[in-house]
Every structure is written in structure tokens, then in C-alpha cells.
Image (cartoon, grey):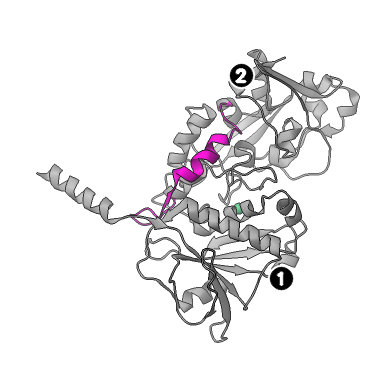
Amino acid sequence: MLKSSLVLLLFAVFSVHSFEPLRILIIRPDDGNFFPDKLERALQTGVAKIQEAINVEPLIDNILRAQDVYNCLQLDSSAQQTGIAKTVSSNEVNTVILNQNIVLNRANFAILLEINKERCDKESELMASANPCYVRDGHRPVIARIRVCPQLNRWMDFLESNTASDVFRHELLHALGWGTVVPSKNATSTPKDVSLKWNVGAAAIPVVRKFLDFGNTATEFARIHFSCSQLEGIETEREDKMHLSEYIFGNELMTPVISTSANYFTEISARILEETHLGPRRWYSVNRSIIGPETAVYSYGRGWGCEFVVASCFDYINLRLRQRRSTFPFCSSADYGRSDHSLHICSSRYQRDLKCDHLPIEPQDKSSNGLTPQPLSNIFPGLPVKFAFRMPSNAETRFCPFIQAISMDVSFSSPPIDEIRPC
Ligand SMILES: [Zn+2]
């Protein structure tokens, strides 16, 4: 009796709660904040792609409260201010008064798009940033603020390579709460930081592995992706837990460095978004028909094993050499010692020489997990003298001797790692 009523109750809870397609209203305060044409097109593409990929918890009412909009923009509520509001799917443009309630007609989420010239001038590296404004009573965010610095020269590389829309896809996920909503202390099941000592050349260096919130189901997927059944969690880049680790997740959409080659919205980020919620009900559901193809071509890290995810790249290289397997995606001492400084890889139908990276040593911050830059001669003793004052790569790639195509973010193809062997 008890069992059957529980089943009925569960059925009632799940059947009442359905999702609807995400529809974004873009509000531009100050009657404008329009971008140059190409950037505007990239924004529209980014919004359209995210709308297509994500379904959301329906709103309880369709009112954006004036007070919330003002708080979100940190405006003084005594000053009347207008804005332009538009969705990507309709040509209708409306003028809205920001200190009056706004009715969401064809939308269920609003972004306040802001060009803050003063802040852009101060933070010369910031292309864009985003965060949801508030979470009320455990319901999903309804408004988010996205700041964009369109005058930044760095946008040119993204516009020329058709990846500027990825910058907006990335920011829109933050706007919905990806990496920006913090779970309540007593509800979190985020793994604790892991402190380790890593072998780097002859030195043992202390490092810390930190994990993202809302990463439980993504971890299950990542275990399969990396072929690492002991993986504890999804490693994050920094203390703020806003991004996937750049080193481990490479060109996934939610790493801190957006690539100008490709950025994939994969099952990993999708599961993190789906787990992101504070109340009893889930906020988001991601369309597998959209992210499935992106996940399928995301090959970074696939099959690279626990040694890649949890140990230093030097331990990874040594393990692979002991196994007489290719050290891909890293170069070994022998590869730097070759006249072409390349990793030679072969498979049954494939042969390629991939350049090994090396850079001049410059004063650099530690990598986010705590590594310090080392000259190549400390790591691989006995290399030609020209490498004595070079280092393998920079902090984002944990100063590891990656093949250049990866550390310099150039697109390239390789066979699955199990098929790669030394030539
Ligand atoms: Zn970000």
C-alpha cells in the first residue's frame, strides 16, 4: 500500500514538472549598447544555438520585476532609464522602461547586455563576463547580466575564425548558473580538495586538485571519456570553481580559455548544467540531439587514462615509455633530441610528425594547481644546449611538453590513442 502510493506520488511529481525550450530576451540598457555588425551576428548565433540546446523549468509568472532589473544592473532606482528589448527569433523591437515591471511575452529568461566602458578600460583582458542576478525560492535565475567589451582587439581572432559565437555560448551558460551558482553548504557533495606531490624532473612539487560543484553525473561520464574508473570528480581551474580545468578538458566549451579552433559543448558541461539547481526541482534539461554530435567529435583526453588526469605529465610520459607506447599528446626527451624536435606517431593507416613546444623562460605565475615553470634541461637532462633556457609550455598547460598543436591551440587530427604507436 505504502509502496504503491509512493509510486503514484513520484509519478505525480515528475509528470507535473516538464521543461520548455529556453527563449532569451536580450535587453540593452541605455537605448542601445549595440555591437559592430560581425560581433552582433556572433551574439545572435550564440543565443540561437544555446536556445536550441537547452530546455528550462517554466516560470511561475512572466513578470520581470523592476526592482530585480535595477538591482541586477546596480542602478539607482530614482533615475528613470529605458532599454531596447528583442528576442533573436522575432523582429519585434520594444522599448522598455527599466524601473517598471517588464512582461516576458515570448521569452522565459532575460539577459541585460551591458557595455561598461569604464570597466572594460580597467580590465584590458576581459572580453565578456556573465552571472545570473539572483535565485529566488529555489527557482532558476530569470535575469542575468552579461558584460561585453566589444572594442577589445582580441575579438578579431575569434571573429575571423568563426568562434566568437562560442564566447557567447560560454557566457550564456554562466548566465544560466553554470559555475556561477553555489550549492548550499549542507547540500554539497563536491569532492574535497586533494593535495599531492608531483614528480617533475628530479623535483617533487606540491599541487592541489580542486573540483567543480554539481559534477556528480558528469564525473560518471568523464570516467568513461578518460578511461579512468577511479576519477573522483570534475577538476576545476581555480578556487572560484567557475570553469573546467584547461589542462584536463582542453577545448571543451567551459574551460577558461576559449579556443579559436573549436569549442565543444559536450555531455560533461551538459550534465553539470542539469545538476545545477538549488530547490527540489531541476532547472535545466539539455537536448542530446544538439550536444551529441559535439560530444562525438570531442577527442581531447579521450582514453588518455588516470595517469593523465591525476598525475603529472612527467609521470604520464614515463609510464607510457615503460609500456613502450607513444607519449602522445606529450613529447619525450627523445623527441626534443631529434633534429626536427617532433613527436613521430604512427597507426595502421596514419603517420605524422607533430612539433614539440618550447618557449623562452619568462617570469610566470604558478599554474592554477601550483606548479612552477621549469627549464627543459631540469625536466629532461641531457638535451641539446639550445633547450637549456627554454621551457616546455606555459601555465595554462601546466608547463608540460605538449605537442605544439595543443599548447598553441591549432586544430589537428589524430587517430584514437589506443591506435597510436611510436613509429
Ligand atoms: Zn567563463
- Between disc 2 and disc 1, the foreground one is 2
The answer to whether 15 appears left or right of 275 in the picture is left
Question: Do the residues under discs 2 and 1 have CB atoms within 8 angstroms?
Answer: no
Query: Between residues 219 and 165, which one lies in front from this camera angle?
Result: 165
Q: For ligand 1, tell me if the residue under mark 1 lies within 8 Å.
A: no
Range covered by the magenta-colored residues:
276-304
Vertical placement of residue 24 versus 397, above or below: below
Kind of residue sitting beneath label 2:
Glu
Residue 290, x across and y down, in percent: 49, 45
The one of 161 and 224 positioned closer to us in this rendering: 161
Q: Secondary structure at mark 2?
A: helix
Vertical placement of residue 26 versus 178, above or below: below
Q: Which residue is mark 1?
A: 117
Residue at 82% across / 24% down in the picture?
Answer: 341
* Residue drawn at the location 44% of the way across and 71% of the way down: 104
Q: Which quarter of the figure is the C terminus placed in?
A: top right
SS at mark 1 in the image: helix
Residue at image point 63% right, 39% down: 250
Q: Specify whether 118 is left or right of 28.
A: right
Judging by the rendered image, the residue that carries numbered circle 2 is 419
Residue 381 screen position, x and y as percent: 81, 21
Q: Is residue 100 magenta?
A: no
Q: CA distance from mark 2 to mark 1?
A: 51 Å
Q: Residue 107 versus residue 240: which sits nearer the camera?
A: 107
Three-letter code, disc 1? Lys
Residue reaching furthest to the left: 1
**Neighbour tally class for label 2: few under 14, some 14-19, many 20 plus, Cα within 10 Å:** some
Whether residue 290 appears in magenta in the rendering, the answer is yes
The crowd level at tag 1 (other Cα within 10 Å; few <14, some 14-19, many 20+) is some
Q: Position of residue 140 (x, y in %)?
A: 42, 60
